[in-house]
Image (tube, rainbow, N blue to C red):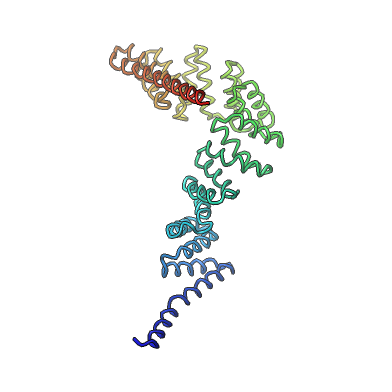
Amino acid sequence: MSKKLFLTVLAIALSTTAIPQSTSQTTAQALEQQGRLAEAAQAWRTIAQKNPKDARAFASLGVVLSKQQSYKEAAFAYRRALALDPTLPSIQLNLGLAEFKQGHFGSAIPPLKAALLADPSSTQAQTLLGISYYGAKRFADAVRYLEPAAKANPENTELHHMLAQSCLQAKQYQCAFEEFRQIVNKDPNSAPAHILTGEALDGLGKTPEAIAEFQTAAKVSPREPNVYFGLGYLYWKSNQFDEAEREFKNQLAQDPGNALALAYLGDLEMKRSHHEKALAYLRQAVQLRKDIRIAYMDLGIILAEAKQYTEAIDALQRAAELDPAQPDAHYRLGRVYQNMGNKSAAQRELNKVQELHKAADEDMASQMAKAAGRNSSQ
């Protein structure tokens, strides 16, 4: 091939690859700037189809699709771009945001963590990561990222609510109390804030103070959902049974189908040895909800005393299923089987009781050993 012919072929090759590609990108960018997003998306798709290893084309397609709120497609485009070039600026943050916008909080966490690692000063990545952990119900992790975000945004009430609730769910009660107290100080008529402050105080072992917060909530908003049940539960927990009964009945007057209020009224009647009344409440409760352990435990106890062993076994087995770590249902089952003359079944349940007690003792021992290890290293 002559030098002249080679240059001609080279010019033709360049004209059919590099130049149209540049023109196409310019066109796609212009369409995006003009707000013609559907056309811009199609232009970037065409570029990506012709150049399947062009990471920037997929990233740009993701941006346009996000602007169209087509977050599922955008996330797919970002992942293609990320696979081709993990170093593209903002790609992890954009992917995390696309997953976040879909409510896919668990999927949003890894790219948002990567984005924050790449830029520790990014308040957007930090806040989104904290909210994603909250949405994924990983509350201890949520606290770690929401706390600095909330401190940086003292006027963002929603962010402080989220932090407070995360602290509460993570059983970091002091943190929860401090956050809810700030919220209450800003809005003394916020019944939910008083209720959540009460929950935090109860977690700190300050049940009388928790009762006061629930009383304030009931006064501020008498029709606040579950406010009377919460107040009744605190009275029940404090062995103030007459007061508890009054509040559970207040809850039922507002919400006749409140299964928890029915269950605890049943427990109160059982404690008073009013078994017929107790059974009526408890059976109503388990018809409405199948996950109230105290209702099944009490049913099993009352039915066993009445020698209605088959029903008692069903109730106690359900109680055991609802909290497998608790030995009390297995102990009661063992007693029922003994009364029925079923020695092997009774022994099986009593063995289970011993296993659970041993596991609890071992856990305490391991915690004490860990504490001793930490102390010795100091």
Any part of residue 241 in sight: no
Q: Specify whether 204 is left or right of 281.
A: right
Q: Residue at x 57, y 42 (%)?
A: 145
Q: Specify whether 19 is left or right of 345.
A: right
Q: Residue at x 59, y 26 (%)?
A: 230
Q: Specify whether 180 is left or right of 263.
A: right
Which quadrant of the view contains residue 291?
top left
Q: Where residue 226 sits: x, y (%)?
A: 58, 30
Q: Residue at x 41, y 66 (%)?
A: 52
Which quadrant of the view contains residue 190?
top right
Q: Where residue 206 sits: x, y (%)?
A: 62, 22
Q: Where residue 367 sits: x, y (%)?
A: 47, 23
Q: Is residue 264 placed above or below 52 in the rendered structure?
A: above
- Foreground: 106 or 290? 106
Q: Is residue 214 placed above or below 146 in the rendered structure?
A: above
Q: Is residue 72 placed above or below 287 in the rendered structure?
A: below
- Foreground: 349 or 123? 123
Any part of residue 271 in sight: yes
Count of all numbered marks drawn on residues in the image: 0
Which quadrant of the view contains residue 199?
top right
- Foreground: 110 or 293? 110
Residue at far front of view: 377
Question: Which quarter of the rendering shows the N terminus?
Answer: bottom left
Q: Where residue 43 sits: x, y (%)?
A: 48, 70
- Foreground: 58 or 198? 58
